[in-house]
Amino acid sequence: MENQFTNSDIAEILSTTGKLMDLHDVDPQRAKAYVDCVFTLERLDEQIAGMNPGKIAQIRGYGRIIQPAILEILQTGTLQELSHLMEITPKGIFDIMQVKGLGVKKVKTLWKEVGIDNLNALKKACEEGVIAGIKGFGAKTQESILSSIAFLESLKGKMRLDQALVLGQEILDKLKMSYPEVELSGELKRIENVISELTFIVKKDGFGGIKLSEGEFEQDLKNSSPSTWRGWFKGFEIPLVVEKVSSNDWVNKKLLRSASPEHLRMQNKEGETFLSVLSSNRFESEEAAYSAMGCPYIIPEMRSSMILPSEDEIVEWNDITGALHNHSTYSDGEASVEAMAQACRDLGFAYFGIADHSQTAAYAKGLWPETVAKQHKEIDALNAKYNGQFRIFKGIESDILNDGSLDYEEEVLKSFDYIVASVHSVLNMDEEKATARLIRAIENPYTKILGHPTGRLLLRRTGYPIDYKKVIDACAANGVVMELNANPWRLDLDWTWIPYCLEKGVMISINPDAHSTQGLLDIKYGVMVARKAGLPRKMTLNALSVDEVAKVFGC
């Protein structure tokens, strides 16, 4: 077995194959088996890639149909069935399948009965009222489709921060082969949550513009100029901008191109904007430019706003002392509690907090009370083994139920060192409902951390609306820590609300929400965006010592 696919990888291939088989009316029994096996696959305690064929065949429901399919995926990296189905499916259908609320049955109706096989055609049909008249759809579905298409269109050419950092570094390395002095600029320099353009500045004097390899770079000739190259890299949709800058203008342009319009509108005591100061002076260092504004040096991450750094040290990766909100094989994680704890020790951390899913989260193998007791017994044994040199905190990510209550009886809740309270279901709430639901959970005396407060998934779904001030005020009143979920899909709480948290004395916990040992490193993305708000080390929960964290948890 050459390909070491995770269970999630295999589940996605099988699920996609099953859906396409349904779409093409191919072998309904096999299609159903592919879709149904995903639930079992994602709940396995062991990675299926490490099993022998006989053991795979013994998994309930994984007989004649599923076992050969899984073996084919592990050996070839795909399914021949899937490859064939993708070839006979119009490319636009895959785009339509991304529209929220459109299952396979509805997509099939649109394609086979109405002849709609791409997003543009679907959008036009909605705007003309055609979709509302189709049996099984209606005006409400039509409105929902239009809203979802608008959201998908807004994502085109954008990348998550983690992806853009990797691509940006690759491009930077390529540019440096031709131009020794190149710097990243724009949104990625500021560490925005989502990147819509990759920008670089190149120090180059004299005549002549920027010339890039046509094999790797595709130029947009219409929108380029002698001083600015515009185009794309290796077919990526995200726009690429490379600007030529003279030596004399280098420092000023570094600041101009790394600052947002809002930051450039920042005013000094004389009423001069940062833009006007940069336009009327030539500086030899960035520090000198901010000094001319009468303010301290502002790091690139903070150049998205007018927030000024405090006198306290801003949190850095090296300040992080532990990881809280993590998952193990007890729920939907890929590694054991001990393996996750050891990975934290390898990173030089002093503690690890386990926060597997609670019992209501059946989709994620949520822990029943008896499983909680079993996990706690294992943690006690591990902590005894560490002999005070490292600590595992007993936590849980408790679902916030629809009425705002937590997911266990009090007897179970009080057995944890801390509870991360999070919403995972019934996300279609209005602001009043969502705010009330969160506040009730915050007011529960067992809640210590409010997890990913809006439930957003960047470039995938918007979060439910909340009254941020009311929620943060409730955290302040109840001594609850606000999570900055560092998973690059989330980055939730949004950094723009950290200053209000600090104003109210609410600490921030930069949590990786790690489902694997590698996922622990996501903390770095949380640190990056926390620095945008100037989050001080002393107000970062997981930058405290193990004893200080224990004191916050009251354990």
Image (cartoon, grey):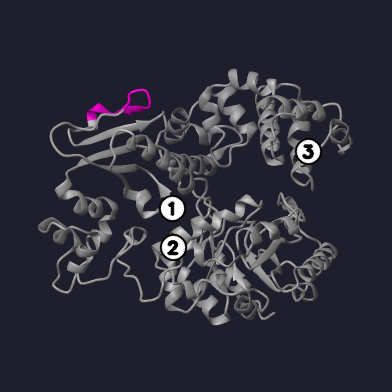
User: Which mark sits nearer the N-terminus, 2 or 1?
Assistant: 1
Q: Is residue 218 magenta?
A: yes
Asked whether, in this view, residue 412 is left or right of residue 258, the answer is: right
Q: Is 475 above or below relative to 245? A: below
Question: What is the distance, in whole Å, between disc 2 and disc 3 at their CAs?
Answer: 40 Å
Asked whether, in this view, residue 203 is left or right of residue 112, the answer is: left
Which residue was labeled with disc 3?
50
Q: Which of the two residues, 505 or 317, is positioned nearer the viewer here?
A: 317
| Mark 3 crowdedness (10 Å alpha carbons): few <14, some 14-19, many ≥20 | some
The single residue placed furthest to the left in the displayed view is: 280
On the image, the x and y values in percent for residue 155 come to: 43, 42
Asked if labels 1 and 2 touch by Cβ distance under 8 angstroms, the answer is yes
| Mark 2 crowdedness (10 Å alpha carbons): few <14, some 14-19, many ≥20 | many
Residue visible at 72% across and 40% down? 7
Q: Which mark is residue 495?
A: 2
Nearest-to-viewer mark from 2 and 3 = 3
User: Which mark sits nearer the N-terminus, 2 or 3?
Assistant: 3
Question: What is the distance, in whole Å, between disc 2 and disc 1 at their CAs?
Answer: 9 Å
**At label 2, which amino acid type do we have?**
Trp
Q: Which residues are magenta?
A: 213-222
Q: Tell me the element at label 1.
A: loop
On the image, the x and y values in percent for residue 509 come to: 55, 68
Q: Tell me the element at label 3.
A: helix
Asked whether, in this view, residue 517 is left or right of residue 211, the answer is: right
